[in-house]
Image (cartoon, rainbow, N blue to C red):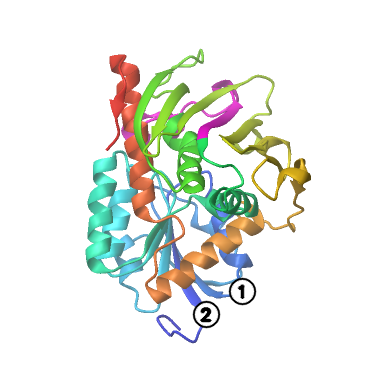
């Protein structure tokens, strides 16, 4: 089956204990184009637990080298601890295996930048799991901006706030600097950094930030941050992230969220209250749109057990199609490099008390 352009896909799934791994296997199970799933477990991963999520199991291993050298596997999905990801991606690229990896992908931007260059030189498709790019809402908002509904965008606003650290496992690798690299900025804030760049077709060039570990629990990484962003086009934005909500259920998957995205331009604005449901509001006074007034667009996505639901299914399917044709992923590795550049600049700004150029 592997590498046959007229067949379905055989996918290798490489995982260490990770909050999203079971959901990613469910995604592969849901995709009709995925015919076989091979599992590779690292650092004590529960392969039996992952295997229970799929009826397509074709083999298991504890060796990354064995997985990426398997001639029947078309591509790999990587869901491992941040410090392990570069080594896995290095092996996949070396073997010519396209890879879709869990963000942020590395402890530092420099590590991921090296891998991006290696993938480009080898002509291997490598993408990051920034699934918001596949959201129907985000795609519509991006098109509205591109079509001039907002005029010249002047300001963006983003908020990604979730349950306090007390409701989570404080011994988890997410809170260890040597294993995670940084905290909420690279774990959750990264989604908003990336999707703002996607919506604006732009890059962040300068940041000014304050970050800290404000929860009472002992933390090696930041749990709260406010970041002012300046984009290459001149757009100025604000990002607030934090493990800040009291009263949440226990556990990673029980966390409550307060999330928002907003874009404001000379001719209109968009508000996306992400934690309130699948809808957005747009108001435009651009020529031809004034009569519509304030519009609300609601979506009712079909149910799916996949990671991020049907959006997640299509995101992975799109990556697989790109990997076979040699096209870039929807969220290419270069986009993940830029996110880490922004995170590093924000943490430097917080530590030094000055604005920092990005990249």
Instruction: Specify whether residue 160 is painted magenta.
Output: yes
Instruction: Specify whether residue 255 is painted magenta.
Output: no
Indicate the quadrant where residue 328 lies. bottom left
In front: 295, or 331? 295
**Residue that appears at 49% across and 41% down:** 196
Residue 25 horizontal side relative to residue 300, left or right: left
Q: Position of residue 232 (x, y in %)?
A: 36, 38
Against 137, residue 232 (above or below) is above
Q: Please identify the quadrant where the N terminus is shown.
A: bottom left
Indicate the quadrant where residue 106 lies. top left
Against 246, residue 287 (above or below) is below
**Residue that appears at 29% across and 25% down:** 356
Residue hosting label 1: 32
Question: In the structure shown, which secondary structural element does the residue marked by tag 1 occupy?
Answer: loop
Would residue 24 be seen by someone viewing this image from the given angle? yes
Against 86, residue 302 (above or below) is below
**Residue that appears at 51% across and 40% down:** 152
Residue hosting label 2: 8
Specify the segment rendered in magenta: 154-183
Q: Position of residue 147 (x, y in %)?
A: 57, 53
In front: 255, or 251? 255
Residue 162 horizontal side relative to residue 209, left or right: right
Q: Are marks 2 and 1 in contact (CB under 8 Å)?
A: yes
**Residue that appears at 28% across and 52% down:** 87
Count of marks, rendered view: 2
Residue 246 horizontal side relative to residue 10, left or right: right
Q: Earlier in the sequence, mark 2 or mark 1?
A: 2
């Amino acid at each position: 089956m592997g590498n046959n352009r007229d067949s379905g896909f055989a996918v290798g799934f490489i995982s260490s204990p990770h909050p999203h791994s079971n959901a990613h296997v469910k995604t592969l199970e849901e995709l009709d184009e995925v015919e076989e799933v091979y599992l590779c477990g690292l650092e004590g991963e529960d392969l039996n637990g992952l295997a229970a999520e799929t009826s397509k199991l074709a083999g298991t291993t504890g060796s990354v080298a064995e997985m990426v050298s398997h001639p029947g596997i078309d591509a790999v999905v990587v869901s491992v601890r941040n410090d392990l990801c570069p080594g896995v991606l290095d092996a996949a690229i070396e073997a010519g295996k396209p890879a879709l990896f869990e963000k942020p992908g590395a402890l530092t931007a420099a590590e991921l930048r090296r891998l991006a260059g290696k993938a480009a030189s080898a002509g291997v498709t490598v993408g990051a799991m920034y699934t918001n790019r596949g959201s129907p809402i985000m795609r519509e908002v991006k098109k509205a901006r591109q079509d001039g509904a907002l005029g010249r965008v002047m300001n963006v606003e983003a908020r990604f706030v979730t349950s306090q650290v007390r409701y989570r496992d404080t011994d988890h690798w997410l809170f260890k600097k040597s294993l995670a690299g940084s905290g909420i900025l690279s774990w959750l804030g990264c989604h908003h950094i990336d999707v703002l760049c996607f919506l604006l077709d732009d890059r962040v060039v300068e940041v000014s930030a304050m970050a800290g570990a404000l929860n009472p629990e002992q933390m090696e990484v930041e749990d709260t941050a406010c970041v002012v962003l300046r984009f290459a086009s001149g757009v100025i934005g604000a990002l607030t992230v934090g493990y800040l909500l009291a009263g949440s259920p226990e556990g990673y998957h029980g966390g409550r969220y307060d999330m928002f995205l907003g874009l404001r331009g000379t001719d209109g604005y968009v508000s996306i209250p992400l934690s309130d449901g699948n809808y957005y509001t747009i108001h435009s006074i651009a020529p031809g749109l004034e009569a519509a007034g304030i519009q609300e667009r609601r979506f009712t996505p079909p149910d799916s057990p996949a990671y991020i639901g049907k959006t997640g299914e299509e995101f992975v399917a799109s990556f697989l199609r790109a990997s076979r044709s040699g096209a870039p992923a929807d969220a290419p590795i270069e986009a993940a490099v830029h996110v880490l550049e922004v995170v590093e600049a924000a943490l430097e700004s917080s530590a030094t008390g000055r604005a920092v150029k990005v990249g």
